[in-house]
């Protein structure tokens, strides 16, 4: 009922505030301070459709693609928001824009990944997609309302 919803909302709000306090206490970190393969502590934030956001420092966020969240296949459930854990720096990339300059993994073993992993990221910039199967530049001059016929 409504009481249960209000209690859930209050719990969610408290967890958000606690997470924000934890992040505020983190060191000020920049992507250039990190090396690929380095183990870093991060605080899991909200899951997105393509992975989980992780705070690595006051002004630095990374992303754990769901395929990188576990050693055995696809991550079934996101990490609980506000949880601190260790991640490895998988790559430093501009494919996701300035918001997520660091890709993270919890998988063990080799860090080599097929280039298609980065091509398939949903938020790659159009320039970085040129020549890949997701290059939409030839449609650039077409108005969105004409994409689909009714």
Image (tube, helix red, strand yellow):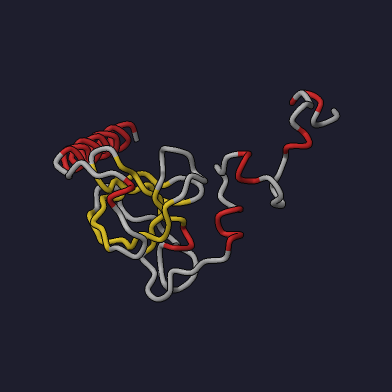
State the image coordinates of residue 107 (x, y, percent, origin top left).
39, 69
Q: Residue at x 81, y 25 (%)?
A: 146
State the image coordinates of residue 122 (x, y, percent, origin top left).
57, 45
**Image quadrant in which you'd find residue 41:** bottom left
- Indicate whether 2 appears above or below 73: above
Instruction: List the single residue furthest toward the front.
Output: 32
Q: Residue at x 71, y 44 (%)?
A: 135
State the image coordinates of residue 116 (x, y, percent, origin top left).
61, 59
Depth check, front residue: 49 or 91: 91
**Image quadrant in which you'd find residue 25:** top left
Instruction: List the single residue furthest toward the bottom.
Output: 109
Depth check, front residue: 53 or 7: 53
| Screen quadrant of the C terminus | top right
State the image coordinates of residue 22 (x, y, percent, origin top left).
17, 43
Instruction: List the single residue furthest toward the left.
Output: 25
Q: Is residue 64 left or right of residue 9?
A: right
What number of labels is visible? 0
Q: Residue at x 33, y 47 (%)?
A: 31
Q: Is residue 1 left or right of residue 85?
A: right
Depth check, front residue: 32 or 78: 32
């Amino acid at each position: 009922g409504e009481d249960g919803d209000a209690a859930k909302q209050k719990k969610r709000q408290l967890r958000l505030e606690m997470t924000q306090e934890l992040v505020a206490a983190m060191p000020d970190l920049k992507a250039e301070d990190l090396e690929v393969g380095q183990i870093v502590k991060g605080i899991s934030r909200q899951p997105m459709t393509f992975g989980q956001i992780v705070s690595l420092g006051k002004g630095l966020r990374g992303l754990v693609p769901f395929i990188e969240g576990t050693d055995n296949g696809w991550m079934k459930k996101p990490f609980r928001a506000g949880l601190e854990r260790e991640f490895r720096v998988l790559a430093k990339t501009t494919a996701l824009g300035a918001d997520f300059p660091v890709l993270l993994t919890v998988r063990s073993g080799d860090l080599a990944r097929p280039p298609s992993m980065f091509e398939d990221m949903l938020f790659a910039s159009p320039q970085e997609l040129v020549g890949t199967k997701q290059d939409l530049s030839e449609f650039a001059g077409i108005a969105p309302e004409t994409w689909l016929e009714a």
